[in-house]
Image (cartoon, grey):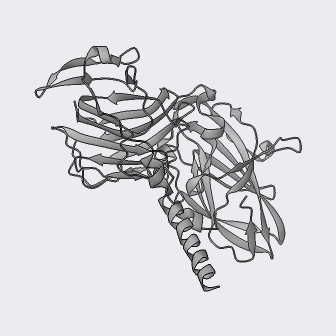
Amino acid sequence: MKNKYYYQKLKQLTLLLLALLSPALIYAQTKPAKPIIIPFEASRFDTTMQKAEFTTYKGVKAMKILSGNKQVVIKGLTFTNGTIEFDTQPVDVSRGAFLSVYFRYQNPNESELVYLRCKPDETEQRNDAIQYAPIIHGVNLWDIMGHFQAPAPIRNTDWNHIKLVISGLQMRVYVNDMAKATLSVPRLEAGTTTGAIAFDGQAYFANLVIKPNDTEWLSPTEGPDLTDHDINYIRRWDVSASQFLEKGRELIVDDQPKDTTQWQPILAERHGLINLTRKFGGMENRGGGVQNKNRYVWLKTTIKSTKEQVAKIQLGFSDEVYVFINGGLLYVDKNQYPQPIRKYPDGRLDIANSTFDIPLKAGDNQLVIGVSNYFYGWGIVARLMDLNGITILQK
């Protein structure tokens, strides 16, 4: 009996160790390939969408891009996992500049993106010097995923050495300091898993080295989402089909969903985000940022209360919300970048955008939110601050 007991304990320990080591074992099955050095020569890049000048700058072969937000794509290269290293320097930062690298790039509508947001004075402390943003259905989701940004030691008048380490669902980005990651992304959010590498921005690019499958032991499985521990988020909604609003029009009581409205369930992503861009796309489903007329949907969910009470809700949103409780208009607000009406932080979707009271009756309460969008990504994050006597849908 004693030997049987020790055997069972050994078996349990072995299974636990295998579970903990599984990401490393997956990595070990894919050996890093030989580094690929790509010189910045015209023959190696597709400049159909964006013109570029291939020159010598500070003694090395370089590519100079001066205008636009179109991509210069490396020809004949498919990237999935590994390391991307290069040097870059802005051309002119008098009015700010963006220095961008795309990976797993399928086309301008579907890609992963990392960029530096350069300012004239890089001695200022700021949280938005570097940002990761997925591009989904042609929409750059920078405004609804502001948590993927960080300060960065950018040099305006010298080379900046950039290293991206990409492994499955995770990424680390290093800027000038190769000992400490400048930005860590626990889950890559685009729909692509493989594709090209591309560049854009008013900048010089040089010294490009790609190391396929060299992921520096970064786990390919997604990292933790700390909001998973917070049951107060409203994660389960029903959503209507998207419609268009005439220019200058807002939603009113008579626009509320009818008995004939068709609904589909929609669940929150990480950080409690109801990501309407992922489901509906952006500019009239043709991609892009600013559109010529607003799109809107209705979201609804049920809040159960054991008594009549007033609850407090936190609501992050992009770009406009029209909140109804049990059929009555409760709250209207706008978060329009770059207008002065934009909410903290700087017009991006965030749980800190707004807080207000919701009057609840005993029993079931129907919460309905009209969400209207005209600019880049759209969605909401909703969280009740106290669940005393309250039950919300989670799945």
In this rendering, does residue 178 appear at all? yes
Q: How many marks?
A: 0
What residue is drawn where x is 59% and y is 25%?
286
Q: Position of residue 189 (x, y in %)?
A: 52, 44
Q: Position of residue 278 (x, y in %)?
A: 61, 39
Front one among 132 and 242: 132
What residue is drawn where x is 47% and y is 42%?
142
> Which quarter of the picture shows residue 98?
top left
Front one among 206 and 93: 206
Q: Looking at the figure, which quarter contains the N terminus?
A: bottom right
What residue is drawn where x is 60% and y is 39%?
277
Left or right for 73, reference 302: left
Left or right for 347, reference 296: left
> Which quarter of the picture shows residue 68?
top left
Front one among 235 and 46: 46
What residue is drawn where x is 37% and y is 19%?
50
In this rendering, does residue 186 appear at all? no
Residue farthest toward the right in the current orientation of the protein: 259
Q: Position of residue 302 (x, y in %)?
A: 78, 60
Q: Position of residue 87 (x, y in %)?
A: 23, 35
> Which quarter of the picture shows residue 206?
top left
Q: Is residue 85 above or below residue 200?
A: below
Residue farthest toward the bottom in the current orientation of the protein: 2
Q: Is residue 349 above or below residue 232?
A: above
Q: Looking at the figure, which quarter contains the C terminus?
A: bottom right
